[in-house]
Amino acid sequence: MTVAVVLFTSDLRLHDHPPLHAALHAADEVVPLFVRDPAVHAAGFDVPNRAAFLADCLADLDASLRRLGGRLVVRSGPVAREVRAVAAACGATEVHMAAGVTGFAHRREERLRKELDTDGVRLRVHEGVVTALAPGAVTPAGSDHFAVFTPYMRRWSKERLRDPLPAPRAVRVPEAARGEDPPERPAGPDLSPDLPPGGESAGRDRFARWAEADLSRYEDRHDDLAGDATSRLSPYLHFGALSPVEVVRRAREKGGAGAQAFVRQVCWRDFHHQVLASRPEVSLRDYRSREDRWRGEEEAAEDIAAWREGRTGYPVVDAGMRQLRHEGWMHNRARLVVASFLTKTLYVDWRIGARHFLRFLVDGDLVNNQLNWQWVAGTGTDTRPNRVLNPVLQGKRYDPDGGYVRRWVPELADVRGSAVHEPWRLPEHRRARLRYPQPLLDLGEGLARFRQARGRD
């Protein structure tokens, strides 16, 4: 009786799961294993929102496996130690897992391979599980990765993605595989009250309903803040509850401009993964070196606090920050606006904003979070590093009737139309009743400071 272990990490699903598929074909029995790694806690990654979503994912994965005759084995401790112990107890000869791109993932894989080699157990790492196209699958001449998105997208779009794999029909788990109950959802003040449910079942249901109702209109509506027509699939892709290969293939089957625009966003995700795979240090350091002397926590303490709490006096910025706190998620257009405001209007170090996002974003990861922040800050892959998003103009363009602002900034609920984006222009007697703060600074002053800091006229 042959046994293989499948180590689940950021791939918490049964559909289109290459490591599980390979293990089931190679062995009579398979141990679906998830390890609660204390290193994740020590690094500060298991914040309440992501811990709650993870708990949902694991519960759903366990329930799905049980319907197939199996179960999820959950262990707690250092990954290499726990995987080695499970493999030894069950007599496993192979361990299968998905490849990662972060420095954390690379170190985990190296430790695991070293420990398993001691026992003569083979580690098989599968590419193209957490992304639609594996990092390094396409490269430009003279470099190991693309530094600009558009040429990457052209090459990426020409590649044929593999066929999605079906979910298994049965999973037989050896009796010797011992574990603990999946973790319960945490509680506490940092848990966002409107956090979405996690898990493959919820993700597949959401994708199916959204694709039917909104995919065809995505190109026209994805920047509509009040319309909220984006897919909201990012948490499910982050935890691997949905396969990016399957998502892209199904969107392309639908066809049309909306599907093309949506697939472009998935391509952005792959683009960032291939950048970080080649340059893992940019999770903390600038991709493009600059002479920026950002303001830090001490110098800009009051401005940073106002930004975090959604009381900058710029309504679309405050709406985005309050949505983040309430839902553990933020509309992509709002993410761009609030990040530009912090880094280029307040001239605060992007890492401060990135840390705050990682504290609450249920889809927060070191790949997309850090590289998107650098893109906005002008230290990443943006070919126009000095662009500044004006929050008033952005609000009027993408929330023209003010519905998004009024939803998240109730102090302005009685201000109708586009006037909600400039409450300081209201008559004084109306401003006094709003109980909404005056702007932290004049946008012109912020722009002048940024241009001076960047050495521009």
Image (cartoon, rainbow, N blue to C red):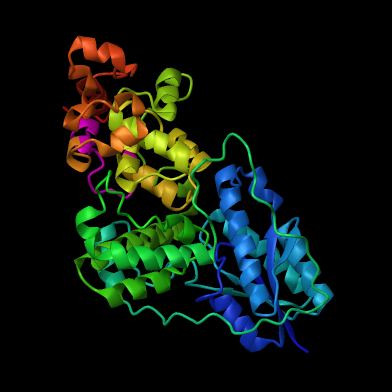
Q: x, y (%) of residue 318?
A: 35, 30
Quadrant location of residue 448? top left
Residue at left offset 54%, top offset 80%? 167
Q: Quadrant of the C terminus?
A: top left
Foreground pick, 6 / 141? 6
Question: Is residue 143 among the parts visible in the rendering?
Answer: no
Which residue, as the protein is rendered here, is positioned at the far front? 414
Where residue 425 appears, as percent x and y from the top left, is 17, 18
Residue shown at 32%/59% (left/top)? 265
Q: Is residue 74 above or below residue 328?
A: below
Against 30, is 101 above or below?
above
Image point (54%, 57%), residue name? 198
Left or right: 62 in relation to 397: right
Vertical relation: 99 (above or below) 40: below
Q: Magenta segment range?
A: 377-395
Does residue 383 show up magenta in the picture? Answer: yes
Q: Is residue 36 left or right of residue 174?
A: left
Mark count? 0
- Residue 222, visible in the rendered structure: yes
Viewer-side residue, 333 vs 193: 193
- Left or right of 57 in this view: 271: left
When asked about the image quadrant of residue 411, the answer is top left
Q: Is residue 225 magenta?
A: no
Instruction: Check the picture and name the quadrant holding the N terminus.
Output: bottom right
- Figure quadrant of residue 186: top right
* Residue 331 on image: x %, y %: 35, 46
Main secondary structure found in the magenta portion = loop
Is residue 343 or residue 418 the one in the foreground?
418
